[in-house]
Image (cartoon, rainbow, N blue to C red):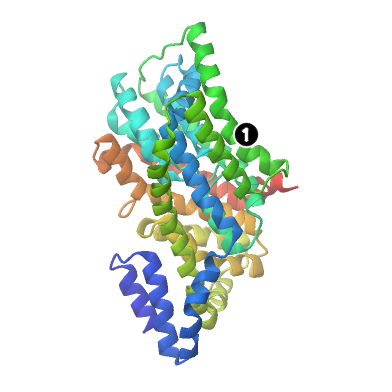
Amino acid sequence: MTAALFLALLFGAVPISIVLALTALSYIWQSGNTVLFDSFAQQMFAGTENYGLLAIPLFMLTGELMNEGGMTKRLVDAARVAVGGFRGGLVWINLLANMFMAAIIGSAVSQIAVMSRAMVPSMEREGYDRGFAAATTAAGGLLAPVIPPSMLFVIYGVLAQIPIGDMFLAGIIPGLMMAGSFFVVVTLIGLSTQFPKGEWMTARAAVQAILAALPAALIPVAIIGGIVMGIATPTESAAVASLIAFLLGWLVYGELRPSQLADLFLRTARNASMVIFMVAAANVFGWVVIYEAIPQKLAALITSLTSDPFVFLLIVMGALLLVGMLIDGIAALILVTPILLPIATGHYDISPFQFGVVISINLALGLLTPPVGVGLYIAASMSDVKPVAIFAALWPFLLAVVLVLLLLCYYPILSLALLG
């Protein structure tokens, strides 16, 4: 009965947080253990009673302040200095700027929305196909859940009860691998498709662009540097980054006014509350998982198929590719982590950091794959291109991500090298 309700609500397009909460309530009623109703609200609150979750609204706020403060445009101009003169320079600028933004925003959906508005019209004006421009921008958005800071890593760290700062470190090499694979993809495409010729900036304009972008570079330095050097926790780094973003947008770039903060805070609170409520609902859903011994049953099934950790991760990859096509990445992460993590660590001795990186990238792919594909539809909406046209140009990037995933599954050191 509980499983039937869960599936009915899930495929009935009910928000995942409501699905998790109602499933837990149904289980309590079905099991007859009604005394648990008395502590239901307390369990939901306990799910949010984690200091690490405070990083989510702070990173969201940093992204909002950057967008309003004019830092996105300046980072794009800085990328233009480095690669703008090559043939197909705008494609490289797009990916390089996405790398910069990934180290700041941490949300693929937000990054795709921001960069689509900034890059697609520029690429089209210089002769690029609009569908390809949107696809490149959307692919660049996949870097946000991997290159720190990452909202998926924050939530996974809370669910797995591991240090979020270490989780960020585990994502650096995989994030650079993904970015490198995208550069290879556009290079190969450029060999078969004659990209428009780029144009180098004058020395004066290049110096001005670099100087204008230097203050904005303080933000990723504050986030990553503070964590790596042990000066600040991810949450504290996020708070410092949001303050820097506000001061830069207001006092340095002059594009952000204190009067805009009320709207920014409201928008951030609305977006963050949806994520945190999902975490709270996942905590009570954990009752169902524990009482039904779902991880143990699933572990028995999978271990009967293979004892090889790599094969196990391949099975997980296949399953999560399907899950990611149907359920939003954050919701899917909250759903599968309590079930799969104990199997990975307990039965296959897989590091929770390697597992977190693999499933986060895996679920991020779902942002750009139908039928749900939230990131795909956002890119289509912001670029005024049909999703089919974007997906047709997107598949080489998705294939590159799958190849990176296979390497991460087979070589744990790629995720663990920076953890010491």
Q: Is residue 295 left or right of residue 122?
A: right
Locate residue 366 relative to residue 43 in the image: left or right: left
- For label 1, the residue is 221
**Frontmost residue, 374 versus 241:** 241
Q: What kind of element bears circle 1?
A: helix
Amino acid under disc 1: Val
The crowding category of the residue bearing disc 1, from other C-alpha atoms within 10 Å (few below 14, some 14 to 19, many at least 20), is some
Residue at 61 percent of width and 40 percent of height:
223
Q: Give the percent coordinates (x, y) of residue 200.
A: 46, 11
In the rendered image, the residue lying farthest to the right is: 420
Residue 164 pos. (x, y %) = 63, 53
Residue 70 position, x and y percent, is 43, 28
- Residue at the extreme bottom: 32
Check the image and report above or below for 74 versus 161: above
The N terminus - image quarter: bottom left
Let me know if residue 97 appears in the view.
yes
Name the residue: 41% across, 26% down. Answer: 91
Residue drawn 72% across the image and 43% down it: 231
Vertical comparison of 299 with 247: above or below: below
What residue is rendered at 24% in x and 36% in y?
384
Name the one closer to the observer, 157 or 260. Answer: 260
